[in-house]
Amino acid sequence: MDGNLNETARFSIPKEKSKANEVLTRVYASMKEKGYDPVNQIVGYLISGDPTYITSYNNARYLIRMLERDELLEELVRFYMEQNDTTPPPYEEADAATR
């Protein structure tokens, strides 16, 4: 830092795969390997909280229960937004009045 207190310093660390990413990837692979539709089964679990939607094969059920469902949803939303490079349109008060 050069001593200029009027500028914001940038701090960055290398991005690492999140624990949720790793768990979802392993659970997805286990579900697929056992012949299930992994997307439907994971959605069923996320909506209901019922772990029986997830196979116990390869400890997938144990792994997915290590994380809170909101952590898994957060990872899914983050990944979707990053992959689709979505930038929301600017908010305008005129738009709000028509809603």
Image (cartoon, helix red, strand yellow):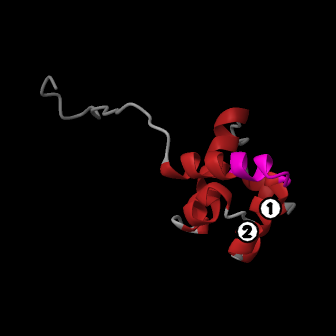
Query: Disc 2, disc 1: CB below 8 Å?
Result: yes
* Residue 22 horizontal side relative to residue 35, left or right: left
For residue 2, say whether it is visible: yes
Q: How many marks?
A: 2
Left or right: 27 as drawn, with respect to 1: right
Taking the magenta stretch, the answer to whether it contains residue 33 is: yes
Give the CA separation, mark 2 to mark 1.
6 Å
Residue 18 spot, x, y in % from top left = 49, 46
Give, as a single range, the part of the protein colored magenta: 28-37
Q: State the residue at coordinates (61%, 67%).
A: 69
Q: What residue sits 72% from the left and 64% below the top?
A: 54
Quadrant of the snapshot with the N terminus: top left
Question: Is most of the magenta stretch helix, strand or loop?
Answer: helix
Image check: 43 left or right of 58? right
Q: Nearer the viewer, residue 17 or 83?
A: 17
Q: Label 1 sits on what residue type?
A: Gln
Q: Which residue is mark 2?
A: 45
Residue located beneath label 1 in the image: 41
Q: Position of residue 42 (x, y in %)?
A: 75, 60
Q: Quadrant of residue 79?
A: top right
